[in-house]
Each structure stands twice: as C-alpha cells, then as structure tokens.
Amino acid sequence: MRIAGKSVLAWVCMAGAALAGCPQGATTVLGCTLGGGAKTLSLCIDGDTVRYDFGKTGQPPELSLSEPVATVAHQPWPGVGRAIWEATTLTNAGYAYEVWMSVDRLSENALPEGGVNVMQGEKTVAELRCDPGTASVSLWAVDDAKQALGICWNFETFSWGGCSG
C-alpha cells in the first residue's frame, strides 16, 4: 500500500503552493494559508525536531511549538479508505494542536487538504482548514523521521515502538 502511495507523495508535494515557514533545509510536513491568506500554518521537521508555527502571514509566528521527532504524537494513515491522511499533535499549556493532512487517493484532480484542530482536554475549541489550493504536504515525513530513529508504528497495537526485523 505504501509503495503505491509514494507516487502519490511526489504528486501531493507539487500540488500545493510554495510557502515560507520552514527553515531552509527543513522538510515541510504541511504548509498553507488560512482565512483567505491572513494566517500561515507550517509543520516542519528540522533535524530531529518537529516544529509548528502559526500566525499572521508575513509576520513572526504568534505561536511556535517544537517537540522531538521521537516523542511527538503522530497518527499515521492506516492504509485503508479513500483518503490518505495523517495527523501530528503538539501540546502547550493544556492545549493540543492536531495538524492534519489528507488527499483523496481515488481522484486524479484532488488537491491536498490540511488544517489544525485545537483542543483543550476533550473539547475542540477551533477547527481551522487550509485555504483551498494552498496546502503543501509531505505525506509520511513524520513516519520516515521516526523510523530513521528506530521507532516504528505497530498496526496491531496502534502504537509506536522499536522496529523489528
């Protein structure tokens, strides 16, 4: 499933608009504008760190969070369904910022989508979607970064652990 998806990965990465946000040399996991271009969202991997930035476009981020790749919460695509999707969650001061991305794998013309869900405990306090056509995504970037550290997803236990074999 994943090998077939790798061709989708190259297509998805090219579909979104190029956006500032990630430092040079970092991998953009998700980058987009929101609110008609008023805000910018980026999720990047820079070395062994995942970084989330959100704020007014063209301004320093209003919120920057970072967490080691090894410990960041990440839900990989389970390999089934019409959409290929992933979600990475960073936390700060009682809030969780779940950055998600998705692409319809059965449509030749589908553009990648993404956004961030902000939660306080179990309550969703905001659901922000990328402006249509602005999402630039690198599916499996967080998975690959974790695997490079010897951490693999176990589809039987739905958890991260050591890679076997």
Image: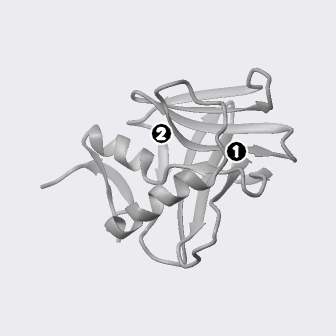
Q: What is the residue that sits farthest to the left in this orientation?
A: 165
Which residue appears at 21% of the width and 50% of the height?
Answer: 163
Q: Which residue is mark 2?
A: 72
Q: In the image shown, does 58 or 18 lie closer to the viewer?
A: 18
Q: Which of marks 1 and 2 precedes in the sequence?
A: 1
Q: In the image shown, does 16 or 30 lie closer to the viewer?
A: 16
Going by the numbered disc 1, the residue's amino acid type is: Cys
Marks 2 and 1: CB-CB under 8 Å?
no
Front label number (2 vs 1): 1
Which residue appears at 81% of the width and 37% of the height?
Answer: 39
Secondary structure, mark 1, is: strand
Residue neighbourhood size for the residue with mark 2, other residues' Cα within 10 Å, grouped as few (<14), some (14–19), many (≥20):
some
Q: Which mark is residue 2?
A: none
> Alpha carbon of mark 2 to alpha carbon of mark 1: how far?
21 Å
**Residue 18 spot, x, y in % from top left:** 64, 41
Left or right for 10, reference 147: right
Q: Is residue 13 visible?
A: yes
Which residue appears at 41% of the width and 66% of the height?
Answer: 5
**Residue 80 spot, x, y in % from top left:** 45, 76
Left or right for 113, reference 124: left
**Residue 138 spot, x, y in % from top left:** 50, 49
Vertical comparison of 107 with 21: above or below: below
Going by the numbered disc 2, the residue's amino acid type is: Val
Q: Is residue 87 visible?
A: no
**Residue 48 spot, x, y in % from top left:** 39, 29
Which residue appears at 80% of the width and 22% of the height?
Answer: 59
Q: Which residue is mark 1?
A: 32
Q: Quadrant of the C terminus?
A: bottom left
- Residue 22: image quadrant is top right
Secondary structure, mark 2, is: loop
Residue neighbourhood size for the residue with mark 1, other residues' Cα within 10 Å, grouped as few (<14), some (14–19), many (≥20):
many
